[in-house]
Amino acid sequence: MKQWLIGIVYSLLRNYAQRVIRQHKPIVIAVTGSVGKSSTKEALYRVLHDEYGDSVRKNYGNLNTEIGVPLTILGYESLPTKWQWPMFLVAAGVRSFTTRVYPKYLVLEMGIEKVGDMRYLATIAPPDYAVITSLAGAHLANFAHKGEYHREKLSITRFLKPGGRALINADDIVMQDLRGEKFVRVAIDNNDADFHAAIIRQTIEETEYRISSTGHKITIKSKLLGRHMVYPSLFAFALASNLGISLLRTGKSLEKLRTLPGRLNVLA
């Protein structure tokens, strides 16, 4: 009985969210990967919000699942309590019909735990841009092997809208050979990536590095500590470039980024 009720909730939320996407046609930036999803989502959101203001929406917290993604699309920032669900589903349905003003950009973190999850999420909100941060492996319990996990993550590229782009980590051993018109490659170690970070200097207070792309270079002084935290900025820079946001404005936005709670913050 419990699974039956959960299935009804999933179905209703999916239908509501799809209705909103069809009606308002936002530009969807989907973020997936083994690690770095939340930090990348925050970097993308920071750059877009500084440029487009309240016309940008992101998932809050860990709302990145079969329930969380539809809730984000519908404009909710948290889950209802157990006893609120019946009235909540009614209100969400009404909202899906009556929303008139809607963000132009959706930054949606998409997490998976089994085969089929990516199709489920990506068919709710087909992405204009798909960001794949890493394929190192996480939440593997429901996959037969890593290859199956890799295929599931990479399958998001099959659901891109016509003309959509996939922003990938060209340092990741699984993705390093992916090339073609739809792939935008970012890297630290791979020098032939479309967006490359180099001259990385780390201190206890900041991480300084230079981002290079065709004909452009900019130095970033970031408060995000650690070499691994350069990747979120690379993805944000690549997206901003594809959207035509200016180099200097993007750099200023990236320097505003702060570490998420519990993610390598300095404690005095």
Image: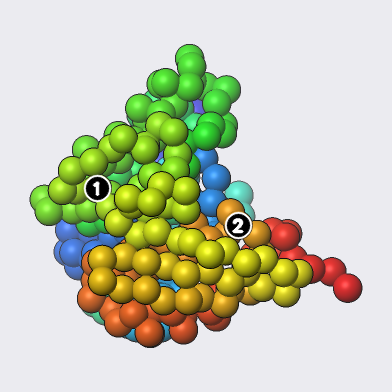
Tag of residue 208: none
Callout 2 amino acid: Arg
In 3D space, how far apart are the residues under numbered discs 1 and 2 (Cα atoms)? Answer: 23 Å
* Residue 139 figure quarter: top right
What scheme was used to colour the molecule? Answer: rainbow
The C terminus appears in which quarter of the rendering? bottom right
Tell me the SS state at disc 1. strand
Residue 153 position within the rendered picture, expressed as x and y whole percent measured from the top left: 38, 35
Relative to 257, say whether 82 is above or below: above
* Residue annotated with mark 2: 227
Residue 240 position within the rendered picture, expressed as x and y whole percent measured from the top left: 32, 71
Q: Which residue lies most toward the right here?
A: 268
Residue 132 or 74: which is nearer the viewer?
A: 132
Q: Which residue lies most toward the left here?
A: 162
Q: Image point 29% across, 44% down: which residue?
A: 122
Label 2 crowd (10 A; few <14 / some 14-19 / many >=20)? some
Q: Can residue 236 be seen in this view?
A: no
Residue 135 position within the rendered picture, expressed as x and y whole percent measured from the top left: 46, 36
Q: Is residue 47 visible?
A: yes
Q: Image point 33% across, 52% down: which residue?
A: 193
Q: Is residue 111 left or right of residue 242?
A: right
Q: Is residue 48 left or right of residue 64?
A: left
Residue 224 or 67: which is nearer the viewer?
A: 224
* Residue 123 figure quarter: top left
Callout 1 amino acid: Phe
Relative to 129, say whether 221 is above or below: below
Q: Image point 12% across, 53% down: which residue?
A: 163
Mark 1 or 2: in front is 2
Residue 266 or 83: which is nearer the viewer?
A: 266
Tag of residue 183: 1
Q: In this view, does 133 lie to the left or right of 81?
A: left
